[in-house]
Amino acid sequence: MVICGKVNFTNLSRYSEITERTYRRQFSRSYNFIKGNAEIIAKVITATARQIIAIDCSFVPKSGKATYGIEYFYNGSASQSEKGLEISVIAIVDVDAKQGYAVSVQQTPPAQPESKRTRIDWYLEQLAATKPYLPKSVHHVVSDGFYSKIKWVDGVVALGLDAIGKLRCDADMRYVYTGEQKPLGRPRKYDSKVDLTDVSRMTLVSEIEPLLYLYTVEVWVISMKRKVRLAFLRDCRQPERVGQVLLFSTDIILDASEILCFYKSRFQIEFIFRDAKQFTGLTDCQARDLTKLDFHFNASLMALNLAKFDAWHLHLSSHPLKPFVFSMASYKRLALNRHLLDRFISLLDLDLTLIKLHPNFHKLCNYGSISAYPCP
């Protein structure tokens, strides 16, 4: 939290009495980060809060011929595939507080042409390994359009969870047949094809904004071979170009407004990637082997969870009635200022009690921060 610049072995040794070699050796050890993250989340998020499981991947730039997992992955920042690493993160998102906490991070292995396993198989294995540590009351897994595949949806449902995602605007869907069945032959499953320009067979949920409508209906998705609850956003604010967004959930009884709210909350995982890359050194690892890379990625995201936990605890003790707002930039600035003040007090043999009781001590701690955090 107090390091300026890259969070790597060399810089870690500059801010402590531990050598760079010791850090490299310690990063080869194992630790149950998933359990540790789950314990932090259990203390921050109350059991009654609305929660979702969010999953997404992030590109990590990395070079070196001997680095494990180097391959071409899609980089969203550059909108193209680039050579580097990819990590898959599973997070718990507090929908009401709009805060996300990473639970599990796993590096995507390189492609093996002789194997029939795909990346979806690896993501499902990660979800299965993480499920025992997830809150028992949470069963909605929210992902973006990349995961809207039959293998992913079937795998999520097989784990006793429900999938929420996004469909293509040209997805092949059928209305569920609700008429009378014939006495002989196979029961009829679905009716005519869904025409998104005709919403007469859909139920209007609400008008979110003027000329922005939310519809819902049960449909049969041909590519997934299953019935889902569809949340259809129709944007008529520009008549010459009507916008359409198709969200779905395997939980048929889930309200369309909840589907929309859960999918919007999924974006909190993007803030996790941003804060980890900018402030906790997610992309700064100097190691090349799988074990040290895995330790570094997990330690980076766990440090972010600890920062949020500490900031939430300070907020709860000082302003319990106000909504919790977290800024990693401010928190790191506060940690650095506190560290420097403690160093000055220690090395200059100053009176600790007199300084910390001074009314301007809190101003020095929050010097340069975006939002002021209370000091313990």
Image: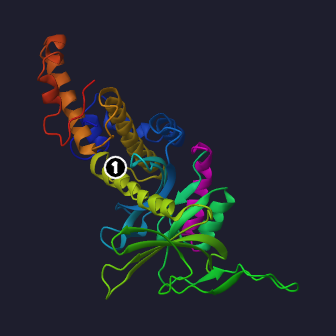
Q: Toward which corner of the image does residue 315 lie, by quadrant?
A: top left
**89 in relation to 335, above or below:** below
For the C terminus, give its image quadrant.
top left
Does residue 14 appear to the left or right of 35 in the view shown?
left
Query: Does residue 115 appear in the picture of this structure?
Result: no
Q: Position of residue 144 (x, y in %)?
A: 46, 67
Residue 322 among magenta residues: no
Observer-nearest of 172 and 54: 172
At x 25%, y 47%, the residue is 6
Q: Position of residue 356 (x, y in %)?
A: 18, 17
Callout 1: helix, strand or loop?
helix
Question: What range of the chain is rendered magenta?
Answer: 111-136
Observer-nearest of 293 and 239: 239
At x 34%, y 62%, the residue is 63
**152 in relation to 295, above or below:** below
Observer-nearest of 262 and 65: 262
Crowding around mark 1 (Cα neighbors within 10 Å: few <14, some 14 to 19, many 20+) is many
At x 51%, y 67%, the residue is 165
Amino acid at circle 1: Ala
Observer-nearest of 312 and 17: 312
Q: Position of residue 72 (x, y in %)?
A: 41, 71
Determine which residue is flagged by label 1. 276
Does residue 62 appear to the left or right of 332 in the view shown?
right
At x 13%, y 29%, the residue is 363
For the N terminus, give its image quadrant.
top left
Query: Does residue 267 appear in the picture of this structure?
Result: yes
Q: Position of residue 203 (x, y in %)?
A: 54, 73
